[in-house]
Image (spheres, helix red, strand yellow):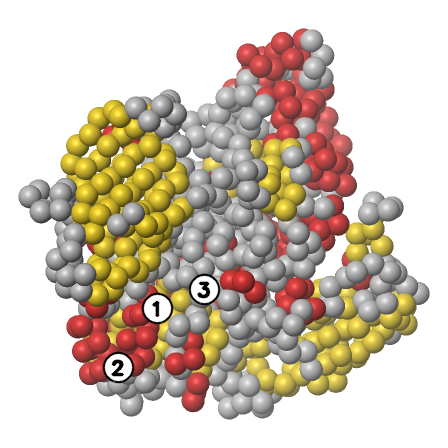
Amino acid sequence: MKIDTRKILARFRWCGLLTSATLLASSCVFAQGPKPVTPEMRQKVDALVQKLTLEQKITLIGGEDDMFIKAMPSIGLPRLKMSDGPLGVRTWGPSTAFAGGIGLAASWDTKLADRVGVMLGEDARARGVNFLLGPGINIYRAPMDGRNFEFFGEDPYLAGQMAANYILGVQSQGVSATVKHFVANNSEFDRHNVNSIVDERTLREIYLPAFEAAVKQGHTGAVMDSYNLINGEHATQNAFLNNQVLKKDWGFQGVLMSDWDATYDGVAAANAGLDLEMPSGRFMNEKTLLPAVKSGKVPEAVIDDKVRRILLTAMRFGWLDRDQTDLSIPLLNQDADAVALQSAEEGAVLLKNEGSLLPLNKQTVHSIAVIGPDSYPAVPGGGGSSTVTAFAPVSFMGGLSKMLAPDVKVYWDAGIQSPQDIFSNTHWCTDATCSRHGLTETKYIQATNQKLTSGVNDHVDNVSGSEWGDAARIPLRVEWTGFYVPKQSGVYRFYTQGVGETRYRLMVDGKQVLEETHHEGQAPKSAIVTLRANKPAQIQFLVWPMTDNITAGLGVIAQDKLIDPEAIRLAKMADVAVVNVGFGPDSESEGFDRTFELPGGQDELIQAITAANPHTIVTLTAGGSVDTHAWIANTPVLLHTWYAGQEAGTALAKILFGEVDPSGKLPISFEKRIEDNPTYKNYYEQTGTHDVKYAEGLFVGYRYYDKSQVKPLFPFGFGLSYTTFAFHNLTITPDKASPDSPITVGFDVENTGSRAGAEVAEVYVGDPSARVERPIKELKGFTRVSLNPGETKHATVTLNRRSFAYWDTRTEGWKVDPGKFVVYVGDSSANVPLQKNLTLQ
Ligand code: BGC
């Protein structure tokens, strides 16, 4: 890793100051990356292990207090602290919130990944954290996965390079990264039970390589097993993946921990390679493992190996020699703020810019209307364990106001109510004459239909299942019944939500209007129904909670009341309108999947604002693609900002007004319709089972679009800039070679426009003469090149044996079929203007 000397000097300055202020000099021990494992180190670790009793060793392999590995003072092991990532050091109070993984991946900037890692490492040390629980690198199969925003997109090579550099950065600060979630954890519904059925070649070529890069190139100190099953075996007890692939094939020497409560069988997990059960030793404990060791079911050597890994990691990172808390690092770290801003700027992808509406000019734009649910407050990230409390997150409205006021007027309106607002504002009636407001809530025992308690709720606004108490013990059905009496005839939009492990159904006048069949939470859904004035509509909302840890929401609004007229008025008045739509922690999160469609009402909002003002810019806050069909044709500008972290608003203002040239590229394929996605028929569990068959095999994302007649709306790797680029002079050296020596791909990148910018050159490799079916081309290298107007730079990318190989199931190894290969260079998977053949012997 390149060392930033400026940074080191700055840190020494801090240490100097602190020492002169007579603070403990030990708090200034400069962090070092992990030391390489040496035979002496192994001997020392073995000696420590020998000092422990079997009971002590077992105690050590179960965590405590949610985020710690237990201390073992007799051998000098301090309590080791963890913090959630991957978007910031999130567990111990406010911290820096960086762009979400997918936004970082959209920068295609490995140096930035490293810089983000360094800052995360500093933030971790400032809080005494030994293990950062990130990066998350599961492959993007479909837009619905509620955690896509944390991960690095659809391509294993891109994800692997971003991950390895992020990890090197974190670990350079003496903090262990924890790459997660190993593996095939590509959806959130039913996440403890879902069984990902993936053939080995697909695993090796699509789902494992980013983890492999994290281990072999990033040297990650820890790996986290996922909740799901893979080919019938839970990740935490999958010996093939943990022992064979991770530890044996890749030589992983660190700690393999479980996801939180992802251990289901102590003996099976112990034997299958799990080193540490988190957040506590619920299964890998003395009660289970002592008799198992004594009876020979679990060899003591297996327990020793786990303890050895924990101690070796502690020794390599220096945790046995120094205090992990580095008080010389400011908690509110301005260097980190700057990197967070860079991550937001470089990650934004400009997808459409009709008539070069962007960049805007402060001299000619006198007023701007900022509208939409994601415009204020700031939405730095999605929901779940990655949610960072940033010190002062900048919303889109805040960022634009700060840059523009008072010269340019900034108007603001949320434009539509959130589903939560609609839940709280709906006026229900318990009976058709509306003698009383509210809906009647009744609990039934699911199995016997026996009626339990009943009462009236004024609103079903996130009613919490904890009120039912016994839902976890006795499976219940909870029903809300009553009426909605519309004041006018017309179209109404019903909204539902069931967060947590639950399913539900909404019936209006006896007809099913909305349904959620998948357990483990859902984003809000909406549907329209036509109602007649003053004719009471009968409502029945049935919820089947799996636990009492759920919330339910129900509401309705007249479609013509959906859009706030003030938003349209402001959009008409302003020179330019910016509509910030998308998701947020309530609608895109760990714990549940999201919809492909934007949350209810947002399509209509975009349509209304673009109709009111032809100079409308739409921004998307989402972890991936969304359904754009209702508005894309009439929207002149579309900018994907993902979840851009604490500086999202500052970055947006700079991009819109041309202080920053957009340079992000899609790390995913953006489909026109969800039916076009290769996983469309097999994303969810097969009926009556927990099985998700990865039937698309290798053909995820662009690998599928390349070979099919279906074209995405925006291809993988695509992104516009305010300038233009061209590629020339492709050379391959040598072009007849053995795959065992490096092959250099050289080309020129030219800035053909009139302003400075950065282009990402993407290098794909195809194997048309392969003996097995292979994708037409696959990303095997990329480089980001910054260029002044008119400037040309020569770039090179080095390919190696692996760039040409596929996983051969017969020999259980990587294989290169000799013959013709094609190297492609371009700016997206759909635009590769340079192509050349090479022959491998
Ligand atoms: C998540 C992990 C997270 C852990 C600790 C789990 O529910 O899946 O990504 O690191 O919780 O908060």
Question: On residue 626, which mark appears?
Answer: 3
- Where does the C terminus fall, quadrant-wise? bottom right
**Residue under the point 53% across and 32% down:** 262
**Residue 575 sits in quarter:** bottom left
Answer left or right for 336 relative to 453: right
Answer few, some or many: residues within 10 Å of disc 2's Cα (few below 14, many 20 plus, some between 14 and 19): some
On the image, which quarter does residue 374 sit in?
bottom left
Q: Which residue is mark 1?
A: 603
Could you say whether the residue bearing mark 3 is in a helix, strand or loop?
loop
Dots 1, 3 in contact, CB < 8 A: no
Residue type, mark 2 in image: Ala
Give the distance between the C-alpha atoms of the residues marked 1 and 2, in whole angstroms.
14 Å
> Which residue, given by chain and number where applicable, does mark 2 sit on?
612
> Could you tell whether 248 is left or right of 474 in the image?
right
Image location (x, y in percent) of residue 784: 60, 72
Query: Around disc 1, counting alpha carbons within 10 Å, would you say few (fewer than 14), some (14 to 19), or many (20 or more)?
Result: some
Question: Earlier along the polypeptide chain: callout 1 or callout 2?
Answer: 1
Q: Position of residue 810 (x, y in %)?
A: 86, 46
| Disc 1 C-beta below 8 A from ligand 1 | no
Tell me how far mark 2 sits from mark 3, CA to CA: 23 Å
Q: Report x, y in % for residue 730.
A: 76, 81
Q: Of the two numbered discs 2 and 3 on the same chain, state the one appearing first in sequence.
A: 2
Say whether residue 701 is visible: yes
Instruction: Please name whichever residue, 454 or 303, is drawn nearer the observer in this view of the structure.
Output: 454
Amino acid of disc 3: Val
Left or right: 452 as drawn, with respect to 119: left
The residue positioned 28% from the left and 59% from the top of the image is 529
Q: CA distance from mark 1 to mark 3?
A: 11 Å
The secondary element bearing badge 2 is classed as helix
Taking the spot 87% from the left edge, 60% from the top edge, the residue there is: 771
Residue 717 appears anywhere in the view = no
Q: Nearer the viewer, residue 100 or 792?
A: 100
